[in-house]
Image (cartoon, rainbow, N blue to C red):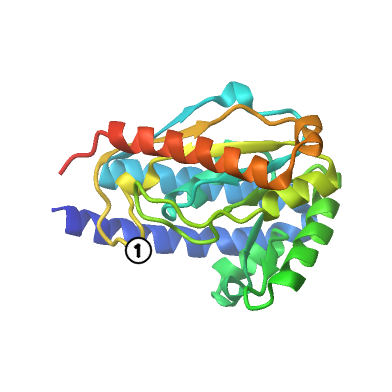
Amino acid sequence: MLVIRSCFFNFIFACLTFIYSILVIISRPFGYAASWFWAKAWTHSVLFSLRLICGIRITIEGQEHIPQEACVLMAKHQSALETIAMPMLIPAYVWILKRELFYIPFFGWTLWVLDAIAIRRNNPREAIKQVNKQGIKFLNQGKWVVVFPEGTRSNLGSAGDYKPGGISLAQKANVGILPLAHNAGACWSKQAFVKKPGTVTLRFLPFISAQHIQGGKRSELLKQIQSDIEHHSLELAEDANIQK
């Protein structure tokens, strides 16, 4: 039954992504806000379908930590689910992602329309320069920047190699950092086809002010952020109520 429900959801997900991608693209001439409206509508439609078809619910904790000003969000990366949910979690933002995603028809074009920062992973030095240059520009415009410090998805309960790019950007742009932990991999794991019914919890951790970021050493800040995100993600993974 889980396989059948997952097949049906994947079909609905593909249809919704195709429809909303077109809406995002054609609405861009009317302003960024117009495109962002449809991006958020896509998120709500997909999550509604995910709950209705696969029985996956979303809960959000720590919203009191979300700042009023634009900042860098550093999030755990376990599945596609946290990326889908992101537009409903925080104000308008841009992604930092691999350039190859731009080549995906419609969805990739949507990422381009929404000003995603696309980097070439085979040239880390140029990628850092690009992230800092474009990231500072977007932060000055009031847009958030979302960073997955692991760079790629990790399995539930495990941690990837955290990169300091998000901290470097925050220091250069003089903004704060908002860490995000979650257990999305419990229901929708890395490269998994079957979605398991249950509750996914997305937990915002205490905001780290720009002043604290400026006064700290990059290596120590990265170590602390990684420790906090991994601790809370592991705690949420152990508490996940997943139906078999």
Query: Please, is residue 102 above or below residue 1 in the view?
Result: below
Q: Is residue 127 left or right of residue 190?
A: right
- Residue 176: which quarter of the image? top right
Q: Which residue is mark 1?
A: 191
Q: Is residue 116 left or right of residue 75?
A: right
Q: Position of residue 58 (x, y in %)?
A: 40, 35
Q: Is residue 14 visible in this depiction of the protein?
A: yes
Q: Position of residue 14 (x, y in %)?
A: 41, 64
Residue at 55 percent across and 58 percent down: it is 20
In what element is the residue under mark 1? loop
Q: Position of residue 149 (x, y in %)?
A: 58, 53
Q: Amino acid at mark 1?
A: Gln
Query: Please, is residue 87 above or below residue 101 in the view?
Result: above
- Residue 47: which quarter of the image? top left
Q: Is residue 94 visible in this depiction of the protein?
A: no
Residue at 47 percent across and 56 percent down: it is 160
Q: How many marks?
A: 1
Residue at 66 percent across and 40 percent down: it is 221
Residue at 84 percent across and 49 percent down: it is 172
Q: Is residue 26 left or right of residue 82?
A: right
Q: Nearer the viewer, residue 63 or 21?
A: 63
Query: Please, is residue 212 above or below residue 81 in the view?
Result: above
